[in-house]
Amino acid sequence: MYSGSGNTLNQIKRHIAACDYLTVAQLFLKSDFLLENPLSFDDIKPRLLGHWGTCHGINLAYANLKYFYEKNPGYSFVLGPGHGFPALQANLFIDGELEKVDKNATRNLHGIEYLCKYFSWPGGFPSHASPITPNVICEGGELGYALATAFGAALGHPEKTIAVLIGDGELETATALSSLNMVKLAGGKANGKVLPILHLNGYKISAPTIYGRKSERELNELVRGFGYTPLVVTENNEDFQIKLAAANRLDHPFLIMKTEKGASGPSAVNDQKVAGNYLAHQIPLPNAKTDESQLKLLEEWLKSYNFEDFYSMEEGILI
Ligand SMILES: Cc1ncc(C[n+]2csc(CCOP(=O)(O)OP(=O)(O)O)c2C)c(N)n1
Protein backbone atom coordinates (compact mmCIF):
# COMPACT_ATOMS: atom_id res chain seq x y z
CA MET A 1 0.00 0.00 0.00
CA TYR A 2 1.28 3.45 -0.92
CA SER A 3 2.84 5.34 1.96
CA GLY A 4 3.84 8.51 0.14
CA SER A 5 7.08 6.97 -1.16
CA GLY A 6 8.68 8.50 -4.27
CA ASN A 7 10.09 5.08 -5.07
CA THR A 8 6.61 3.60 -5.47
CA LEU A 9 5.53 6.50 -7.69
CA ASN A 10 8.61 5.96 -9.84
CA GLN A 11 7.84 2.24 -10.16
CA ILE A 12 4.27 3.04 -11.19
CA LYS A 13 5.49 5.51 -13.80
CA ARG A 14 7.95 2.97 -15.24
CA HIS A 15 5.32 0.23 -15.28
CA ILE A 16 2.88 2.43 -17.21
CA ALA A 17 5.47 3.58 -19.78
CA ALA A 18 6.71 0.02 -20.40
CA CYS A 19 3.14 -1.25 -20.82
CA ASP A 20 2.21 1.65 -23.11
CA TYR A 21 5.22 0.77 -25.31
CA LEU A 22 4.32 -2.92 -25.47
CA THR A 23 0.68 -2.00 -26.18
CA VAL A 24 1.63 0.10 -29.22
CA ALA A 25 4.16 -2.51 -30.37
CA GLN A 26 1.44 -5.21 -30.29
CA LEU A 27 -0.93 -3.07 -32.35
CA PHE A 28 1.56 -2.21 -35.10
CA LEU A 29 4.77 -4.26 -35.25
CA LYS A 30 5.62 -7.57 -36.86
CA SER A 31 9.41 -7.04 -36.56
CA ASP A 32 12.07 -4.66 -35.13
CA PHE A 33 10.28 -4.80 -31.76
CA LEU A 34 13.08 -2.95 -29.92
CA LEU A 35 13.58 -0.35 -32.68
CA GLU A 36 17.11 -1.55 -33.35
CA ASN A 37 16.85 -0.15 -36.93
CA PRO A 38 14.82 2.73 -38.35
CA LEU A 39 11.22 1.49 -38.74
CA SER A 40 10.26 0.46 -42.28
CA PHE A 41 6.94 -0.44 -43.90
CA ASP A 42 8.02 -4.11 -43.71
CA ASP A 43 7.97 -3.90 -39.89
CA ILE A 44 4.26 -2.98 -39.86
CA LYS A 45 1.52 -5.62 -39.70
CA PRO A 46 -0.46 -5.94 -42.93
CA ARG A 47 -3.80 -5.55 -41.16
CA LEU A 48 -3.96 -3.17 -38.20
CA LEU A 49 -6.58 -4.45 -35.76
CA GLY A 50 -7.22 -3.38 -32.20
CA HIS A 51 -8.11 -0.42 -30.01
CA TRP A 52 -5.63 2.14 -28.74
CA GLY A 53 -7.92 4.79 -27.20
CA THR A 54 -8.68 3.08 -23.91
CA CYS A 55 -5.22 1.52 -23.41
CA HIS A 56 -3.22 4.22 -21.61
CA GLY A 57 -6.10 4.54 -19.09
CA ILE A 58 -6.06 0.77 -18.53
CA ASN A 59 -2.29 0.86 -17.95
CA LEU A 60 -2.71 3.81 -15.56
CA ALA A 61 -5.39 2.03 -13.53
CA TYR A 62 -3.68 -1.38 -13.59
CA ALA A 63 -0.33 -0.05 -12.34
CA ASN A 64 -1.81 2.14 -9.62
CA LEU A 65 -4.02 -0.68 -8.35
CA LYS A 66 -1.21 -3.24 -8.54
CA TYR A 67 1.14 -1.20 -6.35
CA PHE A 68 -1.61 -0.13 -3.95
CA TYR A 69 -2.91 -3.66 -3.37
CA GLU A 70 0.39 -5.54 -3.75
CA LYS A 71 0.23 -6.94 -0.20
CA ASN A 72 -3.49 -7.80 -0.41
CA PRO A 73 -3.80 -11.45 -1.55
CA GLY A 74 -7.58 -11.08 -1.99
CA TYR A 75 -7.22 -8.37 -4.68
CA SER A 76 -8.44 -8.91 -8.26
CA PHE A 77 -8.85 -6.64 -11.27
CA VAL A 78 -11.80 -6.88 -13.68
CA LEU A 79 -11.63 -5.02 -16.99
CA GLY A 80 -14.79 -3.80 -18.73
CA PRO A 81 -13.66 -2.51 -22.14
CA GLY A 82 -12.00 -5.85 -22.98
CA HIS A 83 -11.17 -4.47 -26.41
CA GLY A 84 -8.29 -2.69 -24.65
CA PHE A 85 -6.76 -6.16 -24.54
CA PRO A 86 -3.22 -5.29 -25.73
CA ALA A 87 -2.91 -3.15 -22.59
CA LEU A 88 -4.09 -5.97 -20.32
CA GLN A 89 -1.84 -8.42 -22.15
CA ALA A 90 1.18 -6.09 -21.75
CA ASN A 91 0.57 -6.00 -17.97
CA LEU A 92 0.14 -9.77 -17.72
CA PHE A 93 3.38 -10.19 -19.68
CA ILE A 94 5.38 -7.75 -17.55
CA ASP A 95 4.01 -9.32 -14.34
CA GLY A 96 5.07 -12.79 -15.57
CA GLU A 97 1.47 -14.07 -15.39
CA LEU A 98 1.38 -14.87 -19.10
CA GLU A 99 4.57 -16.90 -18.90
CA LYS A 100 3.01 -19.08 -16.17
CA VAL A 101 0.49 -20.40 -18.72
CA ASP A 102 2.39 -19.88 -21.98
CA LYS A 103 6.07 -20.86 -22.01
CA ASN A 104 6.75 -18.65 -25.04
CA ALA A 105 5.90 -15.46 -23.14
CA THR A 106 9.35 -15.18 -21.53
CA ARG A 107 10.27 -11.75 -20.17
CA ASN A 108 13.02 -11.25 -22.76
CA LEU A 109 13.33 -10.47 -26.46
CA HIS A 110 11.89 -13.84 -27.47
CA GLY A 111 8.78 -13.15 -25.35
CA ILE A 112 8.42 -9.57 -26.62
CA GLU A 113 8.53 -10.83 -30.23
CA TYR A 114 5.99 -13.53 -29.42
CA LEU A 115 3.64 -11.12 -27.61
CA CYS A 116 3.72 -8.43 -30.32
CA LYS A 117 3.82 -10.56 -33.44
CA TYR A 118 0.95 -12.82 -32.38
CA PHE A 119 -1.43 -10.14 -31.11
CA SER A 120 -4.43 -10.07 -33.47
CA TRP A 121 -2.66 -12.52 -35.76
CA PRO A 122 -4.07 -15.70 -37.33
CA GLY A 123 -3.68 -18.50 -34.78
CA GLY A 124 -2.30 -16.04 -32.18
CA PHE A 125 -3.90 -13.92 -29.44
CA PRO A 126 -7.35 -12.48 -30.13
CA SER A 127 -7.86 -8.70 -29.96
CA HIS A 128 -10.13 -9.09 -26.89
CA ALA A 129 -9.69 -10.76 -23.52
CA SER A 130 -10.70 -14.40 -24.00
CA PRO A 131 -10.65 -17.73 -22.11
CA ILE A 132 -6.92 -18.18 -22.84
CA THR A 133 -6.14 -14.97 -20.89
CA PRO A 134 -4.67 -15.93 -17.47
CA ASN A 135 -7.16 -15.65 -14.58
CA VAL A 136 -9.91 -14.28 -16.83
CA ILE A 137 -13.38 -14.14 -15.21
CA CYS A 138 -14.96 -11.61 -17.60
CA GLU A 139 -14.45 -12.24 -21.29
CA GLY A 140 -14.07 -9.01 -23.26
CA GLY A 141 -15.85 -8.01 -26.42
CA GLU A 142 -19.41 -7.52 -25.29
CA LEU A 143 -19.73 -4.45 -23.12
CA GLY A 144 -21.80 -4.33 -19.95
CA TYR A 145 -20.89 -7.28 -17.73
CA ALA A 146 -17.85 -6.10 -15.82
CA LEU A 147 -19.60 -4.61 -12.79
CA ALA A 148 -21.99 -7.55 -12.36
CA THR A 149 -19.01 -9.92 -12.69
CA ALA A 150 -17.14 -7.99 -10.01
CA PHE A 151 -20.08 -8.09 -7.57
CA GLY A 152 -20.56 -11.78 -8.33
CA ALA A 153 -16.91 -12.46 -7.49
CA ALA A 154 -17.18 -10.55 -4.19
CA LEU A 155 -20.43 -12.11 -2.92
CA GLY A 156 -19.72 -14.60 -0.16
CA HIS A 157 -15.99 -13.82 -0.19
CA PRO A 158 -15.25 -11.26 2.57
CA GLU A 159 -11.50 -11.68 1.96
CA LYS A 160 -11.78 -10.29 -1.57
CA THR A 161 -11.36 -6.80 -3.00
CA ILE A 162 -12.40 -6.52 -6.62
CA ALA A 163 -11.47 -3.37 -8.54
CA VAL A 164 -13.40 -3.06 -11.78
CA LEU A 165 -12.76 -0.68 -14.65
CA ILE A 166 -15.96 0.28 -16.49
CA GLY A 167 -15.91 2.22 -19.77
CA ASP A 168 -18.06 5.36 -19.91
CA GLY A 169 -19.54 3.94 -23.13
CA GLU A 170 -20.02 0.64 -21.30
CA LEU A 171 -21.93 2.40 -18.51
CA GLU A 172 -24.49 3.48 -21.12
CA THR A 173 -25.52 -0.19 -21.55
CA ALA A 174 -28.60 -1.34 -19.66
CA THR A 175 -26.59 -4.16 -18.07
CA ALA A 176 -23.86 -1.98 -16.60
CA LEU A 177 -26.21 0.80 -15.50
CA SER A 178 -28.60 -1.57 -13.72
CA SER A 179 -25.65 -3.42 -12.13
CA LEU A 180 -24.95 -0.25 -10.14
CA ASN A 181 -27.95 -1.30 -8.03
CA MET A 182 -26.04 -4.35 -6.77
CA VAL A 183 -24.45 -2.10 -4.16
CA LYS A 184 -27.72 -2.57 -2.23
CA LEU A 185 -27.22 -6.36 -2.09
CA ALA A 186 -23.47 -6.40 -1.48
CA GLY A 187 -21.37 -5.20 1.44
CA GLY A 188 -21.68 -6.34 5.03
CA LYS A 189 -19.47 -8.87 6.80
CA ALA A 190 -20.28 -11.78 4.48
CA ASN A 191 -19.10 -10.21 1.24
CA GLY A 192 -15.95 -8.78 -0.27
CA LYS A 193 -15.46 -5.20 -1.37
CA VAL A 194 -16.09 -3.90 -4.89
CA LEU A 195 -14.29 -0.80 -6.13
CA PRO A 196 -15.93 0.44 -9.35
CA ILE A 197 -13.76 2.76 -11.45
CA LEU A 198 -15.51 4.64 -14.23
CA HIS A 199 -13.08 5.29 -17.08
CA LEU A 200 -14.30 8.72 -18.11
CA ASN A 201 -12.42 9.30 -21.36
CA GLY A 202 -15.38 10.98 -23.01
CA TYR A 203 -15.74 8.97 -26.23
CA LYS A 204 -17.13 5.64 -27.51
CA ILE A 205 -16.27 4.48 -31.05
CA SER A 206 -17.21 7.57 -33.13
CA ALA A 207 -19.18 9.70 -30.65
CA PRO A 208 -18.94 11.43 -27.28
CA THR A 209 -20.30 9.56 -24.26
CA ILE A 210 -23.31 10.81 -22.32
CA TYR A 211 -21.31 10.77 -19.07
CA GLY A 212 -18.49 12.70 -20.74
CA ARG A 213 -20.96 15.49 -21.43
CA LYS A 214 -22.38 15.65 -17.90
CA SER A 215 -21.01 18.17 -15.43
CA GLU A 216 -18.91 16.82 -12.57
CA ARG A 217 -21.71 17.73 -10.18
CA GLU A 218 -24.35 15.89 -12.23
CA LEU A 219 -22.18 12.78 -12.43
CA ASN A 220 -21.33 12.86 -8.72
CA GLU A 221 -25.03 13.18 -7.86
CA LEU A 222 -25.90 10.26 -10.13
CA VAL A 223 -23.31 8.02 -8.45
CA ARG A 224 -24.37 9.20 -5.00
CA GLY A 225 -28.00 8.46 -5.86
CA PHE A 226 -27.14 4.79 -6.40
CA GLY A 227 -25.53 4.63 -2.95
CA TYR A 228 -21.81 5.16 -3.65
CA THR A 229 -19.40 7.88 -2.59
CA PRO A 230 -17.79 9.40 -5.71
CA LEU A 231 -14.08 10.24 -5.79
CA VAL A 232 -12.64 11.91 -8.87
CA VAL A 233 -9.13 10.87 -9.90
CA THR A 234 -6.93 12.43 -12.59
CA GLU A 235 -3.97 11.18 -14.65
CA ASN A 236 -1.64 11.77 -11.73
CA ASN A 237 -0.21 8.78 -9.86
CA GLU A 238 0.14 10.54 -6.52
CA ASP A 239 -3.49 11.70 -6.72
CA PHE A 240 -4.48 8.15 -7.71
CA GLN A 241 -2.74 6.62 -4.68
CA ILE A 242 -4.33 9.18 -2.34
CA LYS A 243 -7.80 8.48 -3.76
CA LEU A 244 -7.26 4.71 -3.43
CA ALA A 245 -6.38 5.21 0.24
CA ALA A 246 -9.55 7.33 0.67
CA ALA A 247 -11.61 4.65 -1.14
CA ASN A 248 -10.22 2.02 1.23
CA ARG A 249 -11.78 3.84 4.17
CA LEU A 250 -15.25 4.01 2.59
CA ASP A 251 -17.97 1.33 2.49
CA HIS A 252 -19.08 1.98 -1.10
CA PRO A 253 -16.50 4.07 -2.96
CA PHE A 254 -16.80 4.85 -6.67
CA LEU A 255 -13.80 6.26 -8.51
CA ILE A 256 -14.33 8.47 -11.53
CA MET A 257 -11.04 8.26 -13.47
CA LYS A 258 -10.76 11.14 -15.92
CA THR A 259 -8.33 10.58 -18.78
CA GLU A 260 -7.82 11.96 -22.23
CA LYS A 261 -8.81 9.22 -24.72
CA GLY A 262 -5.64 8.05 -26.48
CA ALA A 263 -3.38 9.87 -23.98
CA SER A 264 0.38 9.38 -24.57
CA GLY A 265 -0.35 8.71 -28.28
CA PRO A 266 -0.28 11.03 -31.31
CA SER A 267 -2.02 14.32 -30.59
CA ALA A 268 -2.86 15.09 -34.25
CA VAL A 269 -2.71 13.29 -37.60
CA ASN A 270 -3.37 15.08 -40.93
CA ASP A 271 -4.31 18.20 -38.96
CA GLN A 272 -7.06 16.30 -37.14
CA LYS A 273 -7.11 16.09 -33.34
CA VAL A 274 -6.56 12.47 -32.28
CA ALA A 275 -5.74 12.29 -28.53
CA GLY A 276 -8.79 13.55 -26.64
CA ASN A 277 -11.03 12.72 -29.59
CA TYR A 278 -12.94 9.75 -31.04
CA LEU A 279 -10.18 9.29 -33.67
CA ALA A 280 -8.04 7.70 -30.94
CA HIS A 281 -10.55 4.86 -30.40
CA GLN A 282 -9.07 2.17 -32.70
CA ILE A 283 -5.86 2.56 -34.76
CA PRO A 284 -4.79 6.23 -34.68
CA LEU A 285 -2.28 5.79 -37.56
CA PRO A 286 -4.27 3.57 -39.94
CA ASN A 287 -1.89 4.09 -42.90
CA ALA A 288 1.38 3.45 -41.06
CA LYS A 289 2.20 0.63 -43.51
CA THR A 290 2.03 2.82 -46.62
CA ASP A 291 2.37 6.46 -45.55
CA GLU A 292 5.87 7.81 -44.71
CA SER A 293 4.57 10.55 -42.41
CA GLN A 294 2.42 8.12 -40.37
CA LEU A 295 5.35 5.68 -40.12
CA LYS A 296 7.51 8.52 -38.80
CA LEU A 297 4.83 9.48 -36.26
CA LEU A 298 4.69 5.85 -35.12
CA GLU A 299 8.45 5.73 -34.64
CA GLU A 300 8.45 8.98 -32.62
CA TRP A 301 5.51 7.70 -30.56
CA LEU A 302 7.28 4.42 -29.71
CA LYS A 303 10.55 6.22 -28.91
CA SER A 304 8.76 8.63 -26.55
CA TYR A 305 8.44 5.80 -23.97
CA ASN A 306 12.24 5.18 -23.74
CA PHE A 307 11.67 1.43 -23.55
CA GLU A 308 15.47 0.93 -23.39
CA ASP A 309 15.22 2.12 -19.75
CA PHE A 310 13.03 -0.90 -18.93
CA TYR A 311 14.84 -3.58 -20.87
CA SER A 312 18.33 -5.03 -21.19
CA MET A 313 19.48 -7.71 -23.64
CA GLU A 314 21.12 -9.65 -20.78
CA GLU A 315 18.38 -9.45 -18.15
CA GLY A 316 15.23 -8.87 -20.23
CA ILE A 317 12.43 -6.81 -18.66
CA LEU A 318 13.78 -4.72 -15.76
CA ILE A 319 10.53 -3.89 -13.93
C1 LIG B 1 -22.99 -4.79 -25.87
C2 LIG B 1 -22.06 -4.10 -26.84
N1 LIG B 1 -22.54 -3.10 -27.61
C3 LIG B 1 -21.71 -2.47 -28.48
C4 LIG B 1 -20.41 -2.86 -28.61
C5 LIG B 1 -19.52 -2.18 -29.63
N2 LIG B 1 -18.51 -1.39 -28.98
C6 LIG B 1 -17.21 -1.76 -28.96
S1 LIG B 1 -16.22 -0.67 -28.20
C7 LIG B 1 -17.52 0.36 -27.87
C8 LIG B 1 -17.33 1.65 -27.14
C9 LIG B 1 -16.75 1.44 -25.82
O1 LIG B 1 -16.69 2.66 -25.16
P1 LIG B 1 -16.13 2.72 -23.70
O2 LIG B 1 -16.82 1.71 -22.84
O3 LIG B 1 -16.25 4.14 -23.26
O4 LIG B 1 -14.64 2.27 -23.85
P2 LIG B 1 -13.37 3.17 -24.26
O5 LIG B 1 -13.83 4.55 -24.65
O6 LIG B 1 -12.57 3.22 -23.01
O7 LIG B 1 -12.74 2.46 -25.39
C10 LIG B 1 -18.71 -0.17 -28.36
C11 LIG B 1 -20.03 0.50 -28.26
C12 LIG B 1 -19.96 -3.91 -27.80
N3 LIG B 1 -18.69 -4.31 -27.85
N4 LIG B 1 -20.79 -4.51 -26.92
Image: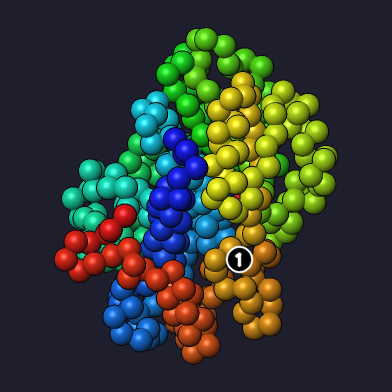
The quadrant of the rendering that contains the N terminus is top left
Q: Which amino acid type is shown beneath numbered disc 1?
A: Ala
**Residue at 44% of width from left, 80% of height from top?**
299
User: Which quadrant of the figure contains the C terminus?
Assistant: bottom left
Extreme bottom residue here? 292
Task: Look at the image and name its color scheme.
Answer: rainbow
The answer to whether the beta carbon of the residue marked 1 is less than 8 Å from any atom of ligand 1 is no
Asked whether, in this view, residue 25 is left or right of residue 78, the answer is left
Indicate the position of residue 70 as horizontal and vertical percent values: 38, 36
Q: What residue is at 63 percent from the left and 67 percent from the top?
A: 275
Q: Is residue 234 visible?
A: yes
Figure quadrant of residue 182: top right
Q: Residue furthest top?
A: 189
Q: Residue at x 68, y 65 (%)?
A: 277
The crowd level at tag 1 (other Cα within 10 Å; few <14, some 14-19, many 20+) is many
Q: Is residue 171 above or below residue 287?
A: above
**In this image, 236 relative to 209: left or right?**
left
**Residue 10 screen position, x and y as percent:** 43, 54
Q: Name the residue rendered at 69%, 77% in the picture.
A: 272
Residue hosting label 1: 280
For numbered disc 1, what is the local secondary structure? helix
**Dividing the picture into quarters, in which one does residue 35 lie?**
bottom left
- The total number of labels drawn is 1
Q: Looking at this view, is 123 or 204 the one in front?
A: 204
Q: Position of residue 127 (x, y in %)?
A: 43, 55
Asked whether residue 147 is in view, the answer is: no
**Quarter holding residue 230:** top right
Q: Position of residue 49 (x, y in %)?
A: 47, 65
